[in-house]
């Protein structure tokens, strides 16, 4: 059974860097699938941030591309999100998710429980 | 930048049928890209509820059904139950934005 678990600091200072990690169990991320990050500001909707493939190829939500970086460590079966120059607008619950394949292509079929990040001094 | 528009809220009495619309454009739903739906119970992560417009993952009750036509999609819940109170989001791919997009979200209330 595939499980995803986010981890990272709950509080980040403005202009700092946010680093989050998604640990995957029950499936080797080097075998396939796209692995994504999605966020949800307090009281608001979902926003796709970007995703990474097992070969390291990445795709980003264009408005976010300049500050967001997704990477992968297959030896640890983890993928990560780095956000530079954070501001209060980056305050959100951050989810990692798997992008489905086959009939579920393009759907986020597995999700982590989410981790809350607050940007504040 | 939500390019998929949903009604902010819908409500119904237990046992009734409610429908949530998801209106897109020619660069997403209208281009034939699949529409997927998620249910987000309070304080929890979203859960895939419907994929490929009208397919339910294993374990999702058949009270939930989906359809797509033109530049819109819809999710119907028949026999509404108290446990269906949640936020629902549609999602697709947008070729102009070259990325995945979510709907604005709809809160379903059971009266």
Image (spheres, grey):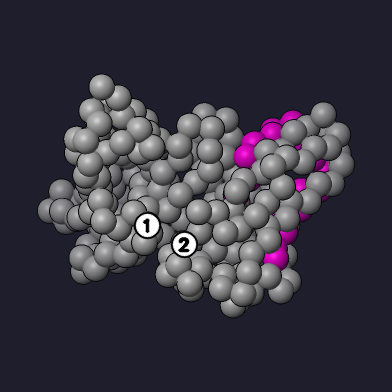
Q: Nearer the viewer, residue A35 or B70?
A: B70
Q: Which residues are magenta?
A: B72-89
Q: Which residue is mark 2?
A: B100
Pointer 1: what residue? A63
Q: Residue furthest top?
A: A121
Which one is in front, A11 or A29? A11
Element carrying mark 2: strand
Q: Quadrant of residue A7?
A: top left
From where the camera sits, is residue A69 visible? yes
- Compared across the picture, whether A1 is left or right of B3 comes to left
| Residue A101 drawn above or below residue B65 | below
Host chain of mark 1: A
* Left or right: where B52 falls relative to A62: right
Residue, x 81% and y 46% (percent of image)? B18
Q: Is residue A35 visible?
A: no
Is A62 drawn above or below residue A4 in the view shown? below
Residue B33 placement (x, y as % from top left): 56, 72
Indicate left or right for A5 with B110 as reference. left
């Amino acid at each position: 059974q595939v499980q995803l678990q986010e981890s990272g600091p709950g509080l980040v200072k403005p202009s700092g860097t946010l680093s989050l990690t998604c640990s995957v169990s029950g499936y080797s991320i080097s075998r396939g699938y796209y692995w994504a990050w999605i966020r949800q500001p307090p009281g608001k909707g979902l926003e796709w941030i970007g995703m990474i493939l097992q070969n390291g190829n990445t795709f980003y939500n264009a408005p976010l591309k300049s500050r967001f970086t997704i990477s992968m460590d297959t030896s640890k079966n983890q993928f990560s999100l780095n956000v530079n120059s954070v501001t209060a607008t980056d305050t959100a619950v951050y989810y990692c998710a798997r992008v489905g394949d086959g009939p579920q292509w393009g759907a986020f079929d597995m999700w982590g429980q989410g981790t809350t990040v607050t940007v504040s001094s | 930048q939500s390019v998929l528009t949903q009604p902010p809220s819908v409500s119904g009495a237990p046992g009734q049928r409610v429908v949530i619309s998801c209106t897109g454009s020619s660069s997403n739903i209208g281009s034939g890209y699949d529409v997927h739906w998620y249910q987000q119970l309070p304080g929890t992560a979203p859960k895939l509820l419907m994929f490929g417009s009208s397919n339910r993952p294993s374990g999702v009750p058949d009270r939930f059904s989906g359809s797509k036509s033109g530049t819109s999609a819809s999710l119907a819940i028949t026999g509404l139950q108290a446990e269906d109170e949640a936020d629902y989001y549609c999602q697709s791919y947008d070729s102009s934005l070259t990325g995945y997009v979510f709907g604005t979200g709809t809160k379903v209330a059971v009266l």
